[in-house]
Image (cartoon, coloured by chain):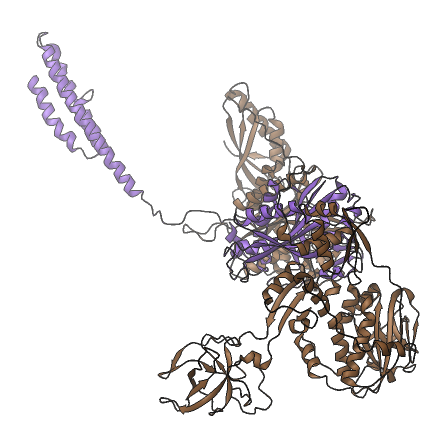
């Protein structure tokens, strides 16, 4: 809401010593946040009306002149003559011109300093319209210095001379304060905050209104519940034309374009008191100038707005009708067919109160958010509806002439203004050490509330809410009013020492996630964070169409890029890889811990709490390129499946997750089937890991191998953090035996490990692979595993013979199970 | 015989002293002092010497042996030193070449910020609680005193999944879930992602993060809200930090306030970061509205409470001097790795 301080002064007499800054502060702290202050006089503080006493040639430059300038006694009590060098050609002795004196920072940002121009000192600048960011005066044809009339008072501040003295406040009015969407509304706040009196303009047409009431206007209200008040008036023979300057300037000051005197007056009264008005061209009303109806729209009824937008109405819409014609969308906008234009002579003027909900619905549905609809949605002071009508009639008769020939209307008996019982103790319950009863009633009264001590109850105030404050219905609303005027700076500060919350079970997960993050960062991974949504196109670069099931989509996305909630974190991380690759960052280690979203097939249990969507907390990782960017001992090897697997194993161990199996099953299509695995414990799936399918690497144009992994953290994080428990280590030496077995390459390392573990169970300590060979030295389709088995007992040193027996057992079992051949050992 | 012994001493000593290395020294030692060395050879003749003379010869022999041993040890030590010197010289490396470091990972600055905030409130006894990002209209709006068709819904542009289900616009929705699940007293912070239909620009993102705080108990006043937020601002920005409250409007709190803290960067003098006001807008807060308590089945005559909500990105941008919110979501290595 733009508020002109000059306009505001019509309703509240602000003492001269109250500064703009003070007004801004008080409004802001009490809830009317002033977001911007625009001072029309800014930049003109040291610019004055001056007179050229003498113009001489500059001694050292043909194109420059040296002027003697008087600015009267603007700078000192004694009239001073300034010597100023000027390059413009349109000046002569005797001209009155704007002079920027030393220290001025003029509107275009230029700072005026003492200077020598071609060897001659110059103590100021004669200004052009451009330099002052002003339009050139209409009377001036030539470019150059701004020319003033001969009667411009020498020495007067230039902004003051031009009348640029207004200050514009841009105020953020919160949705609860519809009453402040007008100059009188804000003036009322200012009056309360500064202890001043609010005065309304005088209405001159009251008597005529009463005389005319019931004549020449008929109103047929068919929507009792949705139209609370409606007043109509007919004025014949108006002269539509340009607005008088006071009206045009008032509107322009708050950024409203002047259209014609009639339309401008309806705007002015709305900006003055907050009541939207509408003027129809009475001759264009289909049923004649005297009759209008307030009715529902018909389904499919056509309507064309003042802005020539065609819309289709429904029974949900409220319409101001004339016969079969829809002349206006009630509270939103008039029709182009009934618009006031230059040829209009008779007008039908409307001032009404419509249902906030109905106006909101129609305005949203048709995307017609107007100054009127905005105000109706936020509540209208129904006690000012008739006043606004009469005020507009006054101004129209004054500015556009015409005869006020008839009026009619109704106002449903509004609910009696709310009466609220406010116990002083309630104020203390909310604010702690609160102001006393006397102070409380003073604050409430200053805001226009009635506040009386209840009969027989010294600690209870009976509070009457004024008609414009329909947001106040409860004691707590009054307490807020008291607090904001009292000032939150008066509030004490205490720490909350109450009892703890009972349930902090989620903190366990949170701690584990923090550990996980730190663990991964120490292994060289950086944490990424991506938006929760993506697009089908981006998902299509990773997943097959048939995998895009259970997708959660946004009904009203901002753009298609943000239209699907992510079912996997991989697509986001791959976009990050692409971003980095395209910026010469080819070695990438990223992880992300965020949610994925999946539609649940079953119906919802409880509309209030069940969204029908499963959110899964996941960890995803991506690796590509080398571990180290550059090293002087040669290139580090590039990441492969095993480097990522090593990281995965280490965090699983850190989180105490044992018994994990890697199987090449149930892999999403974006994985390379020969270099990827699913992880599971028993039947429970933990996640997947592996290289991207060459198809996906190509989709993204990566040009180097990329490895990814994604895990369901819910299946990995521990419900309760388990403490490690110490186990004593053996006192007796561990014996090692090496094996080198060649087997068919379908045999996996895990099978060998399982067999050896099972076979040597009582003595088994560890098994480590130290070489894996495929190549010309062994038959094709075979692989040779070299591994070391560690055996030991807790109660004795194993004898050579004993160990040899175990060794033979292992070899025999491997021959039997896998057809293993052993190299000489 | 004594002469012979002395002669050996004189002959051997210079050789020992000039031995070039361990090998040569060992040879010399064997030659004179070994089992078959010169000294032993001479002493073999001792059996032909009279018993009276033997002690004297023995004495001389010992003297010579001791002297040679000492010379030998001395020489050996100096050869060893020289060898170590030589080794050290050969093994010298350029200590200014870079170490063999893996590349450093980093925690995302928004996670760092969230952790810091959670920790500050943990010290005041606030639990940690999170919940769904896709929310019901009930939790996100209705129960928060924002009925359908209320103009306050225009304060946020909402993304819907289906009628009644939306991408939560505020972590305040978690107030409802927490209060429905638990009985007072409650003292909880809820960090998490929220969504708005805002296009990306330097200061807006369609998804961003908030942290909501809620305290509900018997007899909670606004004084405790002020104390809590003052404590928070001082923990985050330093002990001298001051806060101020401006009246505002949120449907789910009343009274509602916007809270500013004195600018930590210019100490309130006015700078670019605080737009020359000396104050930084950091959060919104207020006393829980009675209608919210009613929506979750709490009796507003029995309990009262406060709630506050702040933007994580806003705080992170202040803490880390980040001037464009989009940097948080590009995941450029050069950005992320500045938060090691």
For the point 46% across and 74% down, the residue is A103
Outermost residue toward the left in this view: B3
Determine if residue A659 is in view. yes
What residue sits 76% from the left and 46% below the top? A459
Residue A719 at x, y = what percent? 67, 36
Q: Quadrant of the N terminus of chain A?
A: bottom right
Q: Could you tell whether A394 is left or right of A19 in the image?
A: right
Foreground pick, A217 / A343: A217
Please state the horizontal and vertical placement of residue A80, each as a whole percent of the image: 43, 82
Q: How many numbered marks appear?
A: 0
Q: Which chain is purple?
A: B
Taking depth in this image into account, of A215 and A456 the one nearest to the observer is: A456
Task: Pick out the residue farthest to the front.
Answer: A456
Any part of residue A686 in sight: no
Q: Is residue B24 above or below residue B289?
A: above
The furthest residue to the top: B51
Q: Could you say which is closer to the camera, residue A154 or residue A353?
A: A154
- Chain appearing in brown on the rendered image: A
- Direction from residue A432 to residue A266 in the image, left or right: right
Quarter occupied by residue B30: top left
Residue A21 x, y percent position in the rendering: 59, 65
Q: Position of residue B286 (x, y in %)?
A: 68, 51
């Amino acid at each position: 809401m733009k508020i002109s301080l000059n306009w505001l002064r019509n309703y509240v007499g602000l003492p001269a010593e109250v500064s703009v800054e003070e007004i801004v502060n008080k409004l802001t702290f009490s809830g009317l946040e002033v977001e911007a202050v625009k001072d029309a006089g800014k930049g003109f503080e040291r610019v004055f009306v001056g007179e050229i006493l003498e113009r001489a040639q500059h001694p050292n430059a043909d194109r420059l002149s040296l002027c003697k300038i008087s600015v009267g006694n603007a700078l000192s009590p004694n009239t001073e003559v300034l010597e100023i060098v000027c390059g413009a050609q349109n000046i002569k002795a005797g001209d009155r011109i704007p002079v920027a004196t030393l220290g001025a920072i003029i509107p275009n940002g230029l700072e005026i300093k003492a200077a020598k121009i071609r060897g001659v000192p110059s103590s100021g600048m004669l200004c052009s319209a451009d330099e002052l960011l002003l339009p050139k005066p209409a009377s001036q044809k030539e470019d150059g210095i701004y020319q003033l009339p001969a009667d411009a008072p020498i020495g007067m501040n230039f902004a003051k001379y031009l009348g640029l003295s207004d200050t514009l406040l841009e105020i953020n009015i919160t949705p609860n304060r519809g009453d402040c969407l007008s100059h009188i509304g804000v003036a009322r706040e200012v009056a309360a905050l500064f202890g001043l009196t609010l005065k309304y303009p005088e209405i001159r047409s009251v008597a005529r209104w009463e005389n005319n009431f019931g004549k020449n206007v008929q109103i047929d209200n068919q929507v009792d519940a949705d139209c609370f008040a409606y007043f109509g008036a007919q004025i014949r023979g108006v002269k539509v034309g340009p607005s008088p300057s006071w009206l045009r300037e008032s509107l322009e000051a708050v950024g409203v374009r002047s259209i014609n005197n009639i339309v401008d007056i309806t705007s002015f009264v709305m900006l003055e008191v907050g009541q939207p008005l509408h003027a129809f061209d009475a001759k264009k009303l289909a049923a004649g100038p005297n009759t209008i109806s307030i009715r529902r729209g018909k389904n499919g009824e056509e309507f064309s707005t003042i802005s020539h937008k065609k819309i289709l109405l429904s029974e949900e819409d409220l319409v101001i009708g004339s016969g079969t014609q829809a002349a206006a969308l009630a509270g939103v906008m008039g029709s182009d067919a009934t618009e006031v234009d230059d040829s209009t002579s008779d007008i039908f003027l409307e001032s009404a109160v419509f249902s906030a909900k109905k106006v909101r619905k129609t305005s949203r549905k048709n995307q017609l958010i107007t100054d009127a609809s905005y105000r109706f949605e936020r509540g209208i002071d129904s006690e000012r509806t008739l006043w606004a009508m009469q005020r507009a009639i006054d101004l129209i008769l004054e500015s556009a002439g015409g005869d006020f020939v008839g009026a009619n209307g109704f106002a449903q008996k509004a609910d009696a203004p709310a009466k609220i019982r406010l116990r002083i103790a309630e104020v203390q319950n909310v604010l702690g050490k609160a102001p006393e009863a006397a102070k409380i009633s003073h604050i409430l009264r200053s805001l226009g509330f009635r506040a009386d001590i209840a009969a027989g109850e010294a600690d209870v105030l009976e509070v009457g809410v004024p008609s414009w404050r329909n947001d106040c219905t409860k004691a707590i609303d009054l307490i807020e009013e008291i607090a904001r005027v009292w000032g939150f700076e008066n509030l004490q500060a205490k720490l909350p020492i109450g009892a703890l919350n009972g349930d902090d079970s989620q903190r366990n997960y949170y701690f584990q996630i923090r550990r996980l993050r730190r663990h991964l960062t120490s292994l060289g991974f950086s944490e990424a964070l991506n938006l929760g949504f993506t697009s089908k196109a981006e998902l299509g670069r990773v997943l097959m169409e048939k995998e895009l099931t259970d997708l959660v989509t946004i009904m009203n996305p901002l753009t298609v890029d943000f239209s699907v909630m992510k079912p996997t974190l991989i697509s986001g991380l791959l976009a990050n890889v692409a971003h980095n690759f395209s910026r010469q960052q080819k070695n990438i280690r990223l992880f992300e811990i965020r949610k994925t979203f999946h539609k649940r097939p079953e119906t919802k249990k409880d509309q209030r709490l069940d969204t029908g969507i499963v959110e899964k907390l996941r960890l995803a990782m991506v690796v590509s390129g080398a571990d180290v960017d550059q090293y002087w001992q040669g290139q580090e090897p590039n990441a492969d499946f095993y480097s990522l697997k090593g990281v995965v194993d280490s965090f699983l161990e850190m989180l105490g997750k044992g018994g994990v199996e890697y199987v090449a099953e149930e892999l999403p299509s974006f994985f390379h089937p020969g270099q990827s695995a699913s992880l599971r414990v028993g039947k429970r799936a933990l996640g997947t890991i592996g290289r991207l399918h060459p198809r996906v690497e190509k989709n993204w144009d990566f040009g180097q191998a990329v490895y990814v992994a994604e895990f369901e953290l819910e299946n990995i994080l521990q419900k309760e953090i388990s403490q490690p428990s110490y186990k004593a280590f053996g006192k007796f030496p561990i014996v090692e035996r090496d094996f080198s077995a060649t087997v068919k390459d379908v045999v996996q390392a895990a099978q060998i490990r399982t067999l050896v573990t099972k076979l040597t169970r009582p003595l088994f300590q560890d098994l480590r692979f130290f070489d894996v060979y495929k190549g010309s030295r062994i038959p094709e389709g075979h692989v040779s595993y070299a591994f070391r088995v560690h055996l030991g007992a807790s109660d004795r040193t194993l004898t050579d013979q004993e160990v040899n027996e175990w060794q033979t057992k292992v070899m025999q079992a491997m021959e039997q199970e896998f057809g293993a051949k052993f190299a000489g050992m | 015989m004594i002469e012979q012994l002395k002669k050996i001493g004189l002959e051997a000593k210079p050789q020992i002293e000039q031995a070039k290395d361990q090998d040569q020294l060992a040879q010399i030692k064997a030659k004179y002092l070994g089992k078959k060395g010169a000294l032993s050879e001479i002493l073999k003749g001792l059996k032909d010497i009279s018993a009276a003379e033997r002690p004297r010869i023995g004495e001389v022999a010992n003297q010579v042996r001791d002297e040679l041993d000492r010379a030998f040890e001395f020489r050996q030590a100096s050869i060893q030193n020289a060898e170590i010197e030589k080794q050290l010289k050969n093994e010298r490396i350029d200590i200014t070449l870079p170490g063999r470091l893996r590349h450093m990972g980093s925690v995302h600055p928004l996670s760092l910020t969230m952790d810091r905030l959670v920790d500050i409130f943990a010290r005041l006894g606030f639990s940690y609680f999170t919940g769904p990002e896709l929310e019901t209209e009930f939790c996100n709006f209705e129960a928060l005193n924002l009925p359908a068709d209320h103009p306050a819904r225009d304060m946020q542009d909402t993304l819907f999944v289906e009628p009644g289900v939306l991408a939560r616009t505020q972590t305040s929705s978690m107030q409802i879930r927490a209060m429905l699940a638990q009985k007072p007293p409650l003292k909880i912070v809820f960090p998490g992602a929220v969504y708005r239909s805002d296009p990306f620009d330097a200061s807006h993102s369609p998804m961003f993060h908030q942290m909501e705080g809620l305290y509900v108990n018997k007899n909670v006043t606004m004084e405790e809200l002020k104390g809590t937020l003052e404590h928070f601002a001082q923990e985050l920005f330093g002990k001298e930090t001051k806060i101020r409250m401006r009246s505002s409007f949120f449907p789910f709190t009343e009274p509602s306030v916007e809270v500013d803290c004195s600018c930590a960067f210019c100490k309130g003098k006015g700078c670019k970061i605080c737009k020359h006001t000396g104050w930084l807008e950091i959060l919104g807060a207020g006393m829980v509205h009675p209608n919210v308590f009613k929506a979750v089945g709490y009796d507003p005559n029995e309990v009262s409470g406060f709630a506050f909500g702040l933007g994580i990105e806003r705080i992170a941008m202040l803490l880390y001097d980040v001037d464009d919110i989009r940097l948080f979501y590009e995941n450029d290595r050069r950005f992320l790795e500045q938060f090691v």
